[in-house]
Protein backbone atom coordinates (compact mmCIF):
# COMPACT_ATOMS: atom_id res chain seq x y z
CA UNK A 1 0.00 0.00 0.00
CA UNK A 2 1.23 3.51 -0.82
CA UNK A 3 1.46 6.26 1.77
CA UNK A 4 -0.34 9.23 0.16
CA UNK A 5 1.37 11.74 2.44
CA UNK A 6 4.82 10.58 1.35
CA UNK A 7 3.76 10.62 -2.31
CA UNK A 8 2.45 14.18 -2.05
CA UNK A 9 5.62 15.27 -0.24
CA UNK A 10 7.77 13.73 -2.99
CA UNK A 11 5.70 15.37 -5.73
CA UNK A 12 6.04 18.76 -4.03
CA UNK A 13 9.80 18.29 -3.69
CA UNK A 14 10.08 17.34 -7.39
CA UNK A 15 8.21 20.53 -8.38
CA UNK A 16 10.48 22.63 -6.16
CA UNK A 17 13.59 21.04 -7.68
CA UNK A 18 12.24 21.58 -11.19
CA UNK A 19 11.70 25.27 -10.39
CA UNK A 20 15.28 25.50 -9.09
CA UNK A 21 16.63 23.90 -12.29
CA UNK A 22 14.67 26.35 -14.43
CA UNK A 23 16.05 29.25 -12.39
CA UNK A 24 19.62 27.95 -12.72
CA UNK A 25 19.26 27.54 -16.49
CA UNK A 26 18.24 31.18 -17.03
CA UNK A 27 20.91 33.20 -18.82
CA UNK A 28 23.05 35.29 -16.49
CA UNK A 29 24.26 38.75 -17.47
CA UNK A 30 27.93 39.00 -18.32
CA UNK A 31 29.63 41.83 -16.49
CA UNK A 32 32.71 42.92 -18.42
CA UNK A 33 35.90 43.23 -16.41
CA UNK A 34 37.21 46.76 -16.79
CA UNK A 35 40.68 47.27 -18.14
CA UNK A 36 42.49 49.21 -15.46
CA UNK A 37 46.10 50.29 -15.18
CA UNK A 38 47.96 48.55 -12.37
CA UNK A 39 51.27 49.16 -10.69
CA UNK A 40 53.16 47.09 -8.14
CA UNK A 41 55.33 47.73 -5.14
CA UNK A 42 56.95 45.60 -2.49
CA UNK A 43 55.39 44.98 0.90
CA UNK A 44 58.03 47.00 2.74
CA UNK A 45 56.98 50.19 0.91
CA UNK A 46 53.31 49.68 1.87
CA UNK A 47 54.13 48.92 5.52
CA UNK A 48 56.24 52.08 5.82
CA UNK A 49 53.56 54.29 4.25
CA UNK A 50 50.94 52.89 6.64
CA UNK A 51 53.21 53.26 9.69
CA UNK A 52 53.68 56.93 8.78
CA UNK A 53 49.91 57.27 9.23
CA UNK A 54 49.94 55.39 12.56
CA UNK A 55 48.36 52.26 11.06
CA UNK A 56 49.87 48.89 11.97
CA UNK A 57 49.96 45.87 9.70
CA UNK A 58 49.73 42.15 10.32
CA UNK A 59 51.21 39.66 10.14
CA UNK A 60 54.49 41.18 11.30
CA UNK A 61 56.12 38.06 12.67
CA UNK A 62 59.42 37.04 11.04
CA UNK A 63 58.82 34.65 8.14
CA UNK A 64 55.05 35.22 8.05
CA UNK A 65 54.99 37.46 4.99
CA UNK A 66 51.98 36.46 2.90
CA UNK A 67 52.63 38.45 -0.30
CA UNK A 68 55.79 40.25 -1.29
CA UNK A 69 54.29 42.23 -4.18
CA UNK A 70 51.18 44.38 -3.97
CA UNK A 71 49.24 45.76 -6.91
CA UNK A 72 47.18 48.95 -6.92
CA UNK A 73 45.59 51.39 -9.33
CA UNK A 74 44.68 55.07 -9.57
CA UNK A 75 41.43 56.65 -8.42
CA UNK A 76 39.89 56.16 -11.86
CA UNK A 77 40.70 52.44 -11.75
CA UNK A 78 39.26 52.03 -8.26
CA UNK A 79 36.18 53.91 -9.45
CA UNK A 80 35.67 51.27 -12.14
CA UNK A 81 35.59 48.35 -9.70
CA UNK A 82 34.56 49.42 -6.20
CA UNK A 83 30.86 49.46 -7.08
CA UNK A 84 31.15 45.68 -7.46
CA UNK A 85 32.71 45.22 -4.01
CA UNK A 86 29.83 46.29 -1.76
CA UNK A 87 27.57 43.48 -0.61
CA UNK A 88 23.96 43.19 0.49
CA UNK A 89 23.39 43.63 4.18
CA UNK A 90 21.17 40.55 4.34
CA UNK A 91 24.35 38.43 4.34
CA UNK A 92 24.90 39.61 7.92
CA UNK A 93 24.69 36.98 10.65
CA UNK A 94 26.03 37.91 14.10
CA UNK A 95 29.41 36.28 14.79
CA UNK A 96 29.16 34.24 11.57
CA UNK A 97 29.13 36.79 8.74
CA UNK A 98 29.71 40.14 10.40
CA UNK A 99 31.80 43.18 9.50
CA UNK A 100 35.04 41.19 9.37
CA UNK A 101 33.54 38.81 6.82
CA UNK A 102 32.38 41.72 4.63
CA UNK A 103 35.88 43.22 4.68
CA UNK A 104 37.51 39.88 3.90
CA UNK A 105 34.98 39.14 1.14
CA UNK A 106 35.70 42.49 -0.53
CA UNK A 107 39.44 41.80 -0.28
CA UNK A 108 39.14 38.32 -1.79
CA UNK A 109 36.69 39.30 -4.53
CA UNK A 110 38.96 42.20 -5.53
CA UNK A 111 41.92 39.83 -5.83
CA UNK A 112 39.96 37.23 -7.75
CA UNK A 113 38.02 39.49 -10.13
CA UNK A 114 40.44 42.36 -10.71
CA UNK A 115 43.93 41.16 -9.82
CA UNK A 116 44.43 43.81 -7.13
CA UNK A 117 45.53 42.69 -3.68
CA UNK A 118 45.46 46.12 -2.02
CA UNK A 119 41.81 46.44 -1.02
CA UNK A 120 43.15 45.64 2.42
CA UNK A 121 41.09 44.18 5.25
CA UNK A 122 41.21 46.74 8.04
CA UNK A 123 40.26 46.65 11.71
CA UNK A 124 39.41 50.01 13.15
CA UNK A 125 37.08 52.07 15.27
CA UNK A 126 33.73 53.59 14.40
CA UNK A 127 31.18 55.13 16.78
CA UNK A 128 29.59 51.67 17.28
CA UNK A 129 32.93 50.17 18.41
CA UNK A 130 35.53 47.98 16.74
CA UNK A 131 34.67 47.38 13.08
CA UNK A 132 36.03 45.63 9.99
CA UNK A 133 36.18 47.48 6.67
CA UNK A 134 38.69 48.10 3.87
CA UNK A 135 41.53 50.51 3.22
CA UNK A 136 43.22 50.94 -0.17
CA UNK A 137 46.10 52.91 -1.66
CA UNK A 138 45.78 54.86 -4.88
CA UNK A 139 48.47 56.40 -7.01
CA UNK A 140 50.33 56.06 -10.26
CA UNK A 141 53.63 54.78 -11.63
CA UNK A 142 55.45 57.07 -9.17
CA UNK A 143 53.95 55.36 -6.12
CA UNK A 144 51.19 55.78 -3.59
CA UNK A 145 49.51 59.20 -3.54
CA UNK A 146 47.15 58.43 -0.67
CA UNK A 147 44.81 56.00 1.06
CA UNK A 148 41.02 55.83 1.18
CA UNK A 149 38.53 53.73 3.11
CA UNK A 150 35.74 51.49 1.82
CA UNK A 151 32.69 50.15 3.68
CA UNK A 152 31.70 46.88 1.95
CA UNK A 153 28.41 46.31 3.84
CA UNK A 154 25.57 48.03 1.99
CA UNK A 155 23.69 48.26 5.28
CA UNK A 156 26.02 51.03 6.46
CA UNK A 157 25.34 54.63 5.51
CA UNK A 158 28.80 55.14 3.99
CA UNK A 159 28.79 52.02 1.80
CA UNK A 160 29.24 52.59 -1.90
CA UNK A 161 31.55 55.57 -1.68
CA UNK A 162 35.24 55.81 -0.91
CA UNK A 163 36.14 58.25 1.83
CA UNK A 164 39.13 59.73 3.63
CA UNK A 165 40.73 58.24 6.74
CA UNK A 166 38.92 59.70 9.74
CA UNK A 167 35.91 60.79 7.70
CA UNK A 168 32.58 59.37 8.93
CA UNK A 169 34.42 58.60 12.19
CA UNK A 170 36.23 55.59 10.67
CA UNK A 171 39.67 55.27 12.29
CA UNK A 172 41.89 52.45 10.96
CA UNK A 173 44.05 50.68 13.54
CA UNK A 174 45.51 47.70 11.72
CA UNK A 175 45.43 46.14 8.23
CA UNK A 176 46.11 42.65 7.00
CA UNK A 177 48.85 42.62 4.38
Image (cartoon, grey):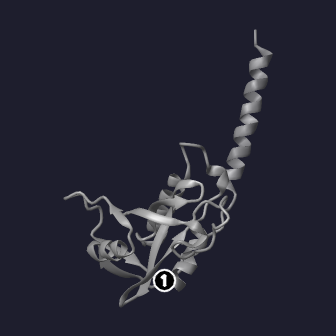
Question: Which quadrant of the view contains residue 126?
Answer: bottom right
Q: Residues within 10 Å of mark 1 (few under 14, many from 20)?
A: some
Q: Is residue 177 visible?
A: no
State the residue lying farthest toward the top: 1
User: Residue 36: x, y in percent?
Assistant: 48, 83
Q: In terms of depth relative to the viewer, which is nearer, 146 or 40?
A: 146
Instruction: Pick the quarter of the image with the N terminus.
Output: top right
Q: Is residue 138 visible?
A: yes
Residue hosting label 1: 36
Residue at point 63%, 70% (across, down):
160
User: The C terminus lies in which quarter of the figure?
Assistant: bottom left
Label 1 sits on a secondary structure element that is loop
Q: Quadrant of residue 167?
A: bottom right
Residue 30 at x, y = what percent? 62, 70
Q: Is residue 59 left or right of residue 118?
A: left
Quick check: 15 left or right of 144? right
Task: Point out the residue furthest to the left here.
Answer: 62
Q: Residue at 62% of width from left, 73% of height from top?
A: 161
Measured from the top left, where is residue 106 in percent x and y? 51, 62
Q: Is residue 123 left or right of residue 51?
A: right
Residue at image position (50%, 66%) is: 171
Q: Position of residue 52 (x, y in %)?
A: 35, 76
For the image, the number of numbered tags is 1
Instruction: Name which quarter of the figure residue 71 lies in.
Output: bottom left
120, above or below 21, in the image: below
- Closer-to-camera residue (134/26): 134
- Give 42 or 164, whichever is nearer the viewer: 164
Residue appearing at x 73%, y 27% in the figure: 10
Check the image and report above or below for 135 versus 22. below
Amino acid sequence: MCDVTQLLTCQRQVKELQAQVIELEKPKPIVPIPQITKWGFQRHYLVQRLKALGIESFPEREGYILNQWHFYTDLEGWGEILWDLAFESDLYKPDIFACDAYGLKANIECRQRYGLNTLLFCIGKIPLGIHGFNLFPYGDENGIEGFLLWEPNEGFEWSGEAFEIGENSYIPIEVMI
